[in-house]
Amino acid sequence: MFAKTVTAALAGTALLATIASAQTPTAIADPASGTISSSSLQGDWRASKLVGLKVYNDKNENLGSINDLIMDKSGNIKAAVLGVGGFLGMGAHLVAVPLDKIKFVNEPVAYTGAASTGKPGGAGGAMTARPPTTTGSTSTAASSKPNPWYPDHAVFNANKDELKAMPEFKYSE
């Protein structure tokens, strides 16, 4: 009788341990090693992928790209340094804008209008976000699958002339 009780208790304990190990961990960091699991960072973006990200305005005109991110001593990102104008990174006008004024977008930007003008989006150079296409039971973006580790592009409410008129950002020595 005692053996049956012990066997039942061990089987119950093993069953509960299996259920507990199948649950997702709620702890973000392992206190012993000081590491963070990648599953706890799902949905967060890599700062290295934000640098170089294309920046558009509300009319979907290409303004430039993010050249740098400025953070305070506690690690909070305060500003993005945008490179406006220039050619292949040479002669770009750098301006610092508050990060909370930039909107990040996961959907890709698509060209619209007549392609024969040589400019993106026809004569106006406007682009619009490409709607997802649906094939059968799955829905995917027309050009590529969005990456969970960084957005497709950024949007800042200004035009190139307004950004070029802003004071140039210079790194202090």
Image (cartoon, rainbow, N blue to C red):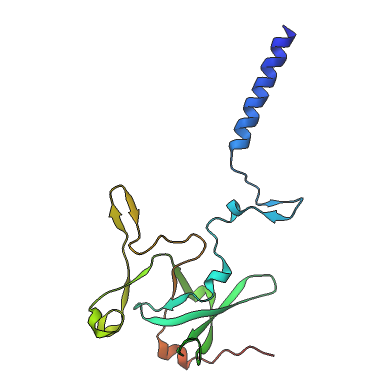
In this image, 21 relative to 103: left or right?
right
- In the picture, the quarter occupied by the C terminus is bottom right
Residue at 74 percent of width and 9 percent of height: 2
In this image, 142 relative to 173: left or right?
left
In this image, 29 relative to 78: left or right?
right
Residue at 57 percent of width and 70 percent of height: 48
Q: Is residue 156 visible?
A: no
- Judged from this view, the residue extending furthest toward the right is 32
Spot occupied by residue 148 in the image (x, y as percentages of width and height): 49, 59
Residue at 46 percent of width and 93 percent of height: 165
- When asked about the image quadrant of residue 172, the answer is bottom right
Q: Decide: is 160 above or below 53.
A: below
Spot occupied by residue 123 in the image (x, y as percentages of width and height): 26, 85
Q: Decide: is 108 above or below 134.
A: below
- Judged from this view, the residue extending furthest toward the top is 1
Spot occupied by residue 79 in the image (x, y as percentages of width and height): 57, 78
Spot occupied by residue 156 in the image (x, y as percentages of width and height): 44, 78
- In the picture, the quarter occupied by the N terminus is top right
Residue at 38 percent of width and 67 percent of height: 108
Q: Depth check: give the residue in front, 82 or 78.
A: 82
Q: Is residue 73 visible?
A: yes
Q: Count how many numbered circles sit on residues in the image.
A: 0
Q: Decide: is 4 above or below 145.
A: above
Q: Decide: is 21 above or below 47.
A: above
